[in-house]
Image: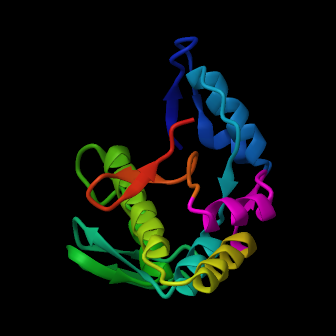
Amino acid sequence: MAWCPSLATGSSSRINDALLDNDPQKVVDEAEKLTGVEIPCYMMITFASFEALIDAMGGIVVDVPKDIKVPDPMTAEDVTVKAGDDQYLDGSEALVLARARKEYDDNQEALRQINVRNLEIAMLQKVLDLDSEKAANVVLVDLEENTSTIWTWPALRRRSLQGDLSGFGVWDAGRGVQRWRP
């Protein structure tokens, strides 16, 4: 569990504890308290749903910084992810990369967070590269089935199909994806 220092109060708490009751709003409340920044919306995904969403998207391509071999938290079977640029990952491999931290000697949490951001960028880029509104709608249905959020899905669909992704995403100027800024 990660200790998160509060920029607003100077205190620390374990942010993971806020999700013990499976209530994402408690995490939002704790993050707002720790940072002093209002968080207007959230989207939550479980391990199983993350794997299912990546698989429904047909996998993703992402840079993998290091060989990783760990048990899949869903099946307990070993999953190996090979280091390299532009690696194709299915859902279980993407989850292993997202959770990897003990494989790194130093800066474990920072490197795990970089992996997560790179996975987010790969997912968003895959959606942005779709060639039709129908294909984008299929991904939105998969997203709706595999996440919980306070966004209304009709509004999210309408905005995304109109190309209005303000407030969403991850910015990587080289790939054309935007990181959200509340």
Across and down, in percent, residue 41 comes to 70, 44
Q: In the figure, residue 165 lies in which quadrant?
A: bottom right
Find the residue positioned furthest to the top: 9
Q: Is residue 87 magenta?
A: no
Across and down, in percent, residue 88 comes to 33, 83
Write the residue at 55% across / 73% down: 73
Question: Does residue 65 appear left or right of residue 111 in this picture?
Answer: left
**Along the line of sight, the residue nearer the viewer: 164 or 152:** 164
Q: In the figure, residue 104 lies in which quadrant?
A: bottom left
Question: Does residue 168 appear left or right of residue 102 in this picture?
Answer: right
* 113, above or below 88, in the image: above
Question: Does residue 171 appear left or right of residue 3 in this picture?
Answer: left
Write the residue at 69% across / 40% down: 27
Q: In the figure, residue 67 lies in which quadrant?
A: bottom left
Write the residue at 42% across / 83% down: 78
Residues shaded magenta? 146-163
